[in-house]
Amino acid sequence: MLEDHVLLSERPEDQLKAVEWAREQKKKIFDEKSRRIADAIMEKMTPLIKKTMYRDSVDRLAR
């Protein structure tokens, strides 16, 4: 896969700052996606977890 590279500045310090900024943005995007996925999973799984916990507690009381 070919990637385009853009030279933002001739100065190495500026290039390093640009790379650091890009890494921070990537981390923010990844963290946000992870949070959304976790929220969606919890929304779907919470009723099942509660149902299972309730059933287990009823089973323990019946013993």
Image (tube, rainbow, N blue to C red):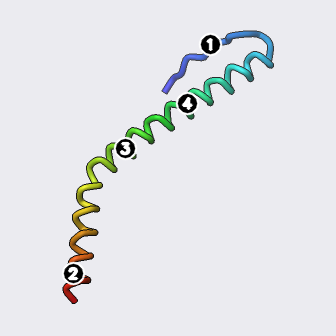
Residue 16 lies, with reference to residue 38, above or below; the image says above
Q: Quadrant of residue 16?
A: top right
Report the number of discs. Answer: 4
Q: What's the residue type where badge 4 is placed?
A: Lys
Q: Residue at x 73, y 10 (%)?
A: 9
The mark nearer the N terminus, 1 or 3, is: 1
Is residue 50 left or right of 11 when viewed as pictured?
left
Q: Sequence order check: which comes first, mark 4 or mark 2?
A: 4
Q: Which residue is mark 4?
A: 26
Identify residue for label 1.
6
Amino acid on which disc 2 is placed: Asp
Viewer-nearest of labels 4 and 2?
A: 2
Residue 59 numbered tag: 2
Outermost residue on the top side: it is 9
Q: Which secondary structure, mark 3?
A: helix
* Amino acid under disc 1: Val
Q: Secondary structure at mark 1?
A: loop
Find residue 28 and report its image quarter: top right
Nearer-N-terminus badge (2/1): 1
Circle 2 SS class: helix
Residue 4 spot, x, y in % from top left: 55, 17
* Point 48% across, 27% down: residue: 1
Using the numbered discs, state the Cα–Cα distance from disc 4 to disc 1 in whole angstroms: 17 Å
Q: Position of residue 55 (x, y in %)?
A: 21, 72
Question: What residue is drawn where x is 24% and y is 68%?
Answer: 52
58 up-or-down from 53: above or below = below
Query: Where does label 3 land, which residue?
Result: 39
For marks 4 and 3 on the same chain, the one whose residue lies earlier in the sequence: 4
**Which dot, 2 or 1, sits closer to the camera?**
2
Counting residues from the N terminus, which is met first, the one under dot 4 or under dot 1? Answer: 1
Q: Furthest-bottom residue in view?
A: 63
Q: Are marks 3 and 2 in contact (CB under 8 Å)?
A: no
